[in-house]
Amino acid sequence: MIWICPNCSSNLNLENKRWACTNGHHFDVAKQGYVNLLSVSRKGSHSPGDSKEMLAARHRFLLSGYYTPLVTELIHLAQHQINDHFIGQWLDLGCGSGYFISQIQNSSLHHQPNWSCLDISKEAVKMTANTTSTNCAVASNFDLPVQSASCNGLLQIFSPAEEKEIFRVLKPNGFLLRITPGPNHLKEIKEAIYTKSSTSKPPPSQPLYQVVTEQTLYYSIQLPNAQIIKDLITMTPFNWRGNPTAKQQLINQGYMKLSLDFRLQLFKKDTQAISRNQQSDQAVQDSLTPLDLTKSLKNC
């Protein structure tokens, strides 16, 4: 297993439904099958992350099929770009309701890796543990309780994370499959609820990753009723941002045509670049551009 102790960073082993390290720290497995490895210093609030209401709205919206083209492209990347390397240990950073992992596991992919997933929201991890065959933990993407160089690949969909942590947990030549919002993603909602509309900027490229492929996916959808519009607003950070009156007006109109704009990137940890630069491990960590995806993801 890949988990490490959030208190002392020692490896954790599963013993009688309890994850324990050699220093005496232990973490019970909940009845839903997940473990809470979120350190108190990383909580920030009593119940960080997505709420039950947000997750329920996202579950209804995603099951309506509006993101099916995105799922199709995600699976296509796994099959044709990662292919025989889509094996071993993969980690979903910010699993949410578990929708994307579930779609991957239920697909006809020839290879299926051993999936682990985490999210800072306990409610999100509960949902994922109930709907997928994964090793789930409550944890922060900015302080991963994961062994160094233990992951063959990482899946990062609309989820901010610490770039140094991503680099640390990836194996040499490991893959990072990242999906972020494009500049026109949900632009109609942004224009309606913000005084000054903002666009999503792509994260900077990383010098120690080889770009395997980059592509965009753009299409329009029609939301036919007030409930599905409300679900979309509730499931995103729009839920707590923007003009409340304008949001209610969008819901009341009972119909919306929306733009969906996604950026799909597949990176490979470039060990040759590290060797060429003759950098120490610490220098490599210091050279990475911090990835604050909060601004680019805030409207997804």
Image (tube, rainbow, N blue to C red):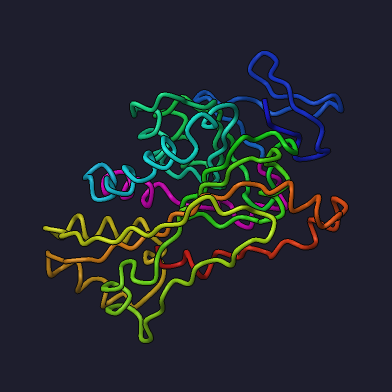
Report the residue that reaches farthest toward the bottom: 195
Q: Residue at x 72, y 61 (%)?
A: 288
Report the residue that reaches farthest toward the top: 16
Image quadrant where residue 29 sits: top right
Q: Residue at x 42, y 28 (%)?
A: 132
- Image coordinates for residue 247, horizontal then vertical, percent: 27, 72
- Image coordinates for residue 89, horizontal then vertical, percent: 60, 29
In the image, taking residue 99 as reference, residue 17 lies left or right, namely right
- Image coordinates for residue 148, horizontal then vertical, percent: 75, 39
In this figure, what is the number of numbered marks? 0
In the image, taking residue 282 as reference, residue 221 lies left or right, namely left
**Image quadrant in which the C terminus is located:** bottom left
Q: Is residue 53 magenta?
A: yes
**Image quadrant in which the N terminus is located:** top right
250, 151: nearer the viewer? 151
* Magenta part of the chain: 38-61
Q: Residue at x 74, y 53 (%)?
A: 273
Q: Is residue 119 magenta?
A: no
116, 107: nearer the viewer? 107
- Image coordinates for residue 284, horizontal then vertical, percent: 80, 56
Q: Residue at x 16, y 66 (%)?
A: 256
